[in-house]
Amino acid sequence: MTRASLLTATARTAHMAMWSESATYKQGGTGTGIAITARKAAVKTVSASGEDVVVSTEWFDWVVTASELAVATVLFEPDIGDTVTVAQADGKTAIYQVGTYGSEKCWEPADTEEKELVIHTKLWSEA
């Protein structure tokens, strides 16, 4: 390992430790829950109102260490229909659904070595 890659790995680990939170990643097809550590990277909010209800959609990007996405030591790619579940301070849980932004994939590498992935999710709420 070169000095530069060692410094990059150390910075990545520190960043995840400071800004991440515990979550559960669940594959849509299997329903298997995997404990992960993820950090929010970006948020965009969109609202649409109908006659009786206002539906808000928040698009969150989550950064995850790629090696955490494994079932029985087999790595997998995030897919539409998967979820990221996070326990909130008020005791409730928020379920973020993995999805796309237009025609893009639902995930992309966060770095050139693909050690971390950015997973695109949506959080729906009604009022």
Image: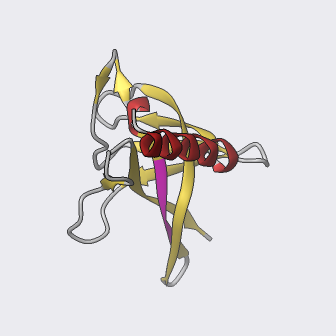
Say above or below: 60 vs 35. below
**Which residue: 44% across, 31% down?**
68
Specify the segment rendered in magenta: 57-63
Name which quarter of the figure residue 120 lies in.
Answer: bottom left
The overriding secondary structure of the stretch rendered in magenta is strand
Would you say 40 lies left or right of 61 here? right
Give x and y (percent) for residue 111.
37, 53
Give x and y (percent) for residue 82.
36, 43
Figure quadrant of the C terminus: bottom right
**Which residue: 56% across, 56% down?**
40
Task: Work out which residue is located at the far left of the displayed protein and give it.
Answer: 103
Q: Is residue 77 magenta?
A: no
Would you say 71 lies left or right of 24 here? left
Q: Nearer the viewer, residue 37 or 27?
A: 37
Give x and y (percent) for residue 8.
49, 46
Q: Nearer the viewer, residue 3 or 101?
A: 3
Give x and y (percent) for residue 93.
64, 45
Say above or below: 123 vs 83. below
Name which quarter of the figure residue 1 lies in.
Answer: top left
**Which residue: 46% across, 36% down?**
25
